[in-house]
Structure formats: structure tokens, C-alpha cells
Amino acid sequence: MAAALGWWIVALALTTAMTATAQERPTAQRLLPHDVNFCFARTYDAAHLARNPKQQIVELRLGARAGWNVHGQRDLPYHDIIVALDVRTRAGAKPNLVLGSCSDYEESNEPGAERGLHCELVCNGDRLVVDALDANTIVVRNRGLRTSCERAPIGGKADAVFHLRRQALAVCAELPTLPAGEEAIQAALTKAREKR
């Protein structure tokens, strides 16, 4: 009887722990909300790059400005936001700014699709999938990222997945150089796509 009770207590504890863990894991929608400033970034040091010689991306920053998604909830129940991505590679001294629109539309999240926000970038066919790891970390999966539409995609296992931590807005230094307001950033996004 005591042994059975002991197993029942262990099973209950494990179930409670698994339920709590599942509930505590945030979603990308919560970490990248509508109409707020946010910045997530990762810079790889020389030691990391020496251990991973095939990795091309040395710095990645993903952010947004309040005002870009004032009407972002017009497609409820879908989550639809605009983001700016700064990418710096071994070949480039300066970050390259890439705009994109991210959503969790059903067609992007059919059974078997990757969980998270699916981001279409300005270059035709360039995509990212953004998911949440914990309350301060997003996972960015590269599904066709280029620093400009004229360059080849950055690919390979070494540049497939990145963990970016929440940062002060000042870390995403390029954000203030972009236009404020949804209409202006939508126009910039459209113009960038027309140039591709």
C-alpha cells in the first residue's frame, strides 16, 4: 500500500512539473507583441567563431518600434507584426538591415509546420521562423536569409538556428533610423520589395 502510494505521489509530482513547464513556456506572440518597442540580439565572440569556422553570421539583432503595428490586430485571431533584422557576417564590417513581416496565419502553421511566427523578408523566398525559448530568449530559424537580395542566401547547419536574448532598445541601434508609424514602415517595406 505504501509503495503504491509512493508511486502515485511521484507520478502526480511529475505530471504537475510537466504541466507547469508547458504553461511557463511563452510563445513568440507574447515575446514579440503588437505596437511596442523590443530588441533581441546576439553577438558571437572570437572564441565561438573559432570553434565554428563555418558560421558566417557574427551578429544578429531583431527588433521593432512602437507605431509599426498600431493596426496589427486587424486580422485577429492572427498575430501579424513588422520587424527589422540587423545581420552582420564575417564578410561585412557593418550590419545589413532587412525588413520583414511575421505572422502566425493558419497556412503557415498547418499540422507539421514549425511552431512560431513565420517571417517573410524583403528578398523573394527569404524566410525566418521565430519562436520563444523562455521569457527573455527567442529562437530564430534561418529558412533563407540574405544580407541583400543580390547576395546568395546564408545557409548551412552553422547558420541555421540562433538564440537571441532580450536587450535594451539601444542595442538595436538601427531602429531609430527607420521611419516611425505604420504607414511609413509599410511604405519602406513595399519599396524594399520592389527593389529586389
Image: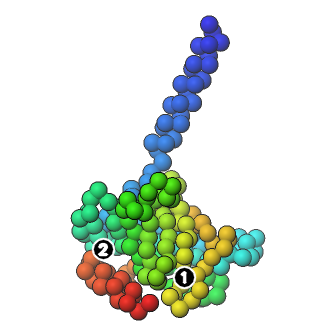
What's the CA distance linking mark 2 and mark 1? Answer: 23 Å
Q: Which percent across, then down, holds residue 8? A: 57, 19
Image height check: is 117 above or below 149?
above
Residue at image point 50% right, 88% down: 149
Amino acid type at mark 1? Arg
In this view of the protein, which residue sits in the foreground, 181 or 143?
Answer: 143
Q: Which percent across, then down, holds residue 179? A: 32, 83
Q: Viewed as shown, does residue 73 lie left or right of 27?
A: left
Q: Is residue 164 visible?
A: no
Q: Which percent across, then down, holds residue 140? A: 53, 66
User: Which residue matches tag 2?
Assistant: 68
Q: Which percent across, then down, holds residue 181? A: 26, 78
Residue at image point 67% right, 69% down: 157
Q: Which mark is residue 146?
A: 1
Q: Upstream in the sequence, badge 2 or badge 1?
A: 2
Q: SS of the residue at dot 1? A: loop
Q: SS of the residue at dot 2? A: loop
Residue at image point 30% right, 85% down: 187
Q: Quadrant of residue 182?
A: bottom left
Q: Is residue 25 visible?
A: yes
Residue at image point 40% right, 62% down: 107
Amino acid type at mark 2? Trp
Do the residues under discs 2 and 1 have CB atoms within 8 angstroms? no
Image height check: is 155 above or below 35?
below
